Image (cartoon, rainbow, N blue to C red):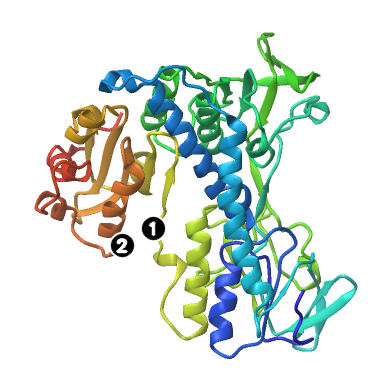
Amino acid sequence: MALHHEQFDTIIIGGGQAGPGLASKLDARGERVAVFQQSAFGGTCLNDGCRPTKALRASAHAARAARTADAYGVHVEGVTVNVAQAVERKDRLIDGWRQSGSEYYEGHESISYVNARARLAGKDGDLYRVEFDGRVVTAPRIVLNPGARSVPPAIDGLERVDFLDHHTLLDLKEAPERLLVIGGSYIGLELGQIWSRFGSEVTILQSGEHVMPREDPDIADAAAQFLRDEGIEVRTGVTITRAEPAGTGALLTLADGERIEGDRVLVAAGRIPNSDDLGLDTVGVTTNARGYIETDEHFLTSAPGIYALGDVNGRGAFTHTSYQDHEILADHLAGGARSAADRIPTYAVFTDPPLGRVGMTLGQAREAGLNLSVADYEMASVTRAALDGVTPGRVRLVIDADRDRLVGAAVLGLHGDEVVHALSMLMHVDGPASALGTWLAIHPTVAEFLPTIYGVAEPDSRP
């Protein structure tokens, strides 16, 4: 712990993806800055979110490639997965990043980086009080970056089950024989597929009619289908009425009386912001009904001088949105014009193959009352997908026909997480959708089909 002052210009509570970067920018401007981080450096993304899951995804991808190599004329015998070695590889990567980041800030000459739980405790005049370990520091500006956490659904008896969440699953050293996944949204699908490829018999149980309920139903259904084709049991419209322990796993009872047993259970059915123990009431910071801190387009809360970045502000539960939050705030504090109001939602779901998404879904664009043109194209008709033998998925472009502007896109399939960036950039610079029909793309790539896909756009035929 390095605490260089008792009074600061800015105190940052939370050292996830926004906090440390903002601290460095403000420090470079001559401010006295303190960062308080209760858990390990890097927050969810580095420790048990984006990066470790993608490290395991790479191992799972290698296992799948080996098992299906015969189709490419490559013969691999006796494929096995040593989960402990895959986890060890993941840990080496994450430990290195965590150590270098924490050492940099803990040893920083001017930024005070403190490993401690900190909370707001009212004001002293124009200064906000922050308490930690029985001590108090003050600052006129506070930045909240505490992140979010997973929560189990309200299922009778679930509290007695030794269930896994997306944190603890990542440290299993063996693949359970049967893994039940409660929740069919992004985390459930990604982790369910990884552990299926590691050797588990996986059943994904989704309460809604479709997996990934934020997506257009047909896009979500296409993702569910390629998971089913891979041997994963994906069940939708499922209501779990009771859970009871069964060894290290659970016996689940469904609304229709069916009982399903698994050796382990992964709960991936919800997250809530870490806003409930920050002392917000002592300084007048308000939250909405779901606990997210309400902010304006520059992340200012209801209390002057207090800002909220990352998952806790409800503006996007992604590493890249959190990181951009700090860039926007740093620009705003320097008198710049950047604003969260200009941000276009962009993200990926890292199933294999992935889903890249930007802007509105087709359903959202219809609700907005736009005059739409829509292009739909099967990934199986994309040359590169056929060459690589990865043909599941589809591409959708949603176009505001009156303004010649792309308002949304989904790229489900090979390299979808990368291809979507071309569409995101077009929207970011407010370029015409018709530009998609005239650009020169490299052959053979997935992106080269964007002009072709744009060319099949037709007026929206609403159901």
Residue 8, quarter of the rendered image? bottom right
Which amino acid type is marked by label 1?
A: Ile
Tell me the number on the disc at residue 423: none
Quick one: 117 or 48, which is closer to the camera? 48
Give the alpha-carbon distance from disc 2 to disc 1, as whole Å: 7 Å
Quick one: 457 or 16, which is closer to the camera? 16
- Image quarter where the N terminus lies is bottom right
Residue 455 image point, x, y percent = 12, 41
- CB atoms of marks 2 and 1 within 8 Å: yes
Residue 28 image point, x, y percent = 54, 86
Residue 58 image point, x, y percent = 46, 39
Say left or right for 27 vs 229: right
Which amino acid type is marked by label 2?
A: His
Residue 120, quarter of the rendered image? bottom right
Residue at the spot x=63%, y=22% of the render? 180
* Crowd tier of the residue under label 2, counting other residues whose Cα lies within 10 Å: few below 14, some 14–19, many 20 or above: few
Q: Secondary structure at mark 1?
A: loop
Q: Is residue 403 above or below residue 340?
A: above
Residue 349, quarter of the rendered image? top left
Residue found farthest to the bottom: 30
Residue 409, visible in the rendered structure:
yes
* Residue holding disc 2: 428
Residue 368, visible in the rendered structure:
no
Q: Is residue 86 above or below residue 439?
A: above
Say left or right for 170 vs 458: right
Q: Is residue 229 above or below residue 349?
A: above
* Residue holding disc 1: 344
Residue 425 image point, x, y percent = 29, 59
Quick one: 417 or 408, which is closer to the camera? 417
- Image quarter where the C terminus lies is top left
Q: Secondary structure at mark 2?
A: helix
Residue at the spot x=37%, y=44% of the render? 356
